[in-house]
Image: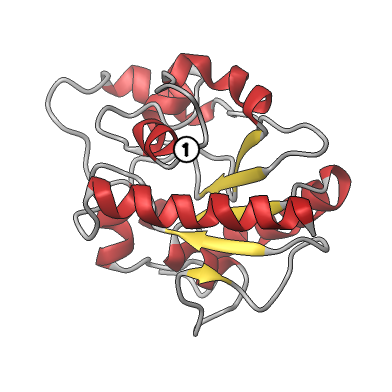
Amino acid sequence: MSSRSVRLTHRFASETFGRLRAGSPSCQTRAMAATKVLGPIVAPGLRVLFVGVNPSLRSAEVGHHFARPGNRFWPTLHAAGFTPRRLRPDEDHELPVYGIGVSNLATRATRAADELTLDELRAGAAELERTVRRYQPRLVAIVGLTAYRLAFSRAGAEMGLQTDELGGRPVWVLPNPSGLNAHYKPADFARLYAEARAHADILASA
């Protein structure tokens, strides 16, 4: 492995990607999906900008965020009080109506976490900062602790509100909602994401 690449931990891989299961797209379809770029959904004055690590091949294939079957992002948003009903991945364009945006640290869709390089994560962090400075969401919520530690050189970071801001806005780290993340149950996701929502609401009244 080159010095410019990083082999992410097994836990990070289990949180986010893992290997494709039976019934996944063909090799040709996967190759095509890997070349697609899934752009952010942003607008000025968002309550929360959620930042994933990078798109799954499924998300790149269908053109919608958090689209891999089993991903708990959409039910968690509803359970945590961000949306009045459970949205589908193909309704991701409706998120700004509820004050929510979605982006990723890295734009390249991958099959597994170890296909990302540290350079990609760091470059994505710099681009994210520019996006945050431009749109100024109340709160930046990064979903994936290990990705945050790597991308922003914050080895000691923990879940929750961070001491360092990004683009002049507060940062909150949340667990990755991938179905492969066995460290958290649905109730845990709902509680932790609701804490981020409550903090965003406090910021609105400050």
Looking at the rendered image, the quarter that the C terminus falls into is: bottom right
Residue at the image position 47 percent from the left and 26 percent from the top: 60
Q: Position of residue 184 (x, y in %)?
A: 24, 56
Residue at the image position 62 percent from the left and 71 percent from the top: 152
Residue 95, quarter of picture: top right
Please give left or right for residue 201 compared with residue 34 in the image. Answer: right
Work out whether 50 lies above or below 71.
below
Residue ranking furthest to the front: 205
Residue ranking furthest to the bottom: 156
Residue at the image position 22 percent from the left and 35 percent from the top: 20
Residue ranking furthest to the left: 22
Work out whether 186 lies above or below 6.
above
Q: Which of 177 and 191 is in front in this view?
A: 191
Work out whether 115 lies above or below 156.
above
Residue highlighted by disc 1? 81
Q: Where is residue 188 in the image (x, y as percent from the top left)?
A: 29, 55
Name the colouring of the figure: secondary structure
Q: Which of 64 and 7 is in front in this view?
A: 64
Q: Is mark 1 on a helix, strand or loop?
A: loop
Q: Nearer the viewer, residue 90 or 147?
A: 90
Residue 57 in view: yes
Amino acid type for the residue under numbered disc 1: Gly
Report the number of numbered marks.
1
Work out whether 82 lies above or below 162.
above
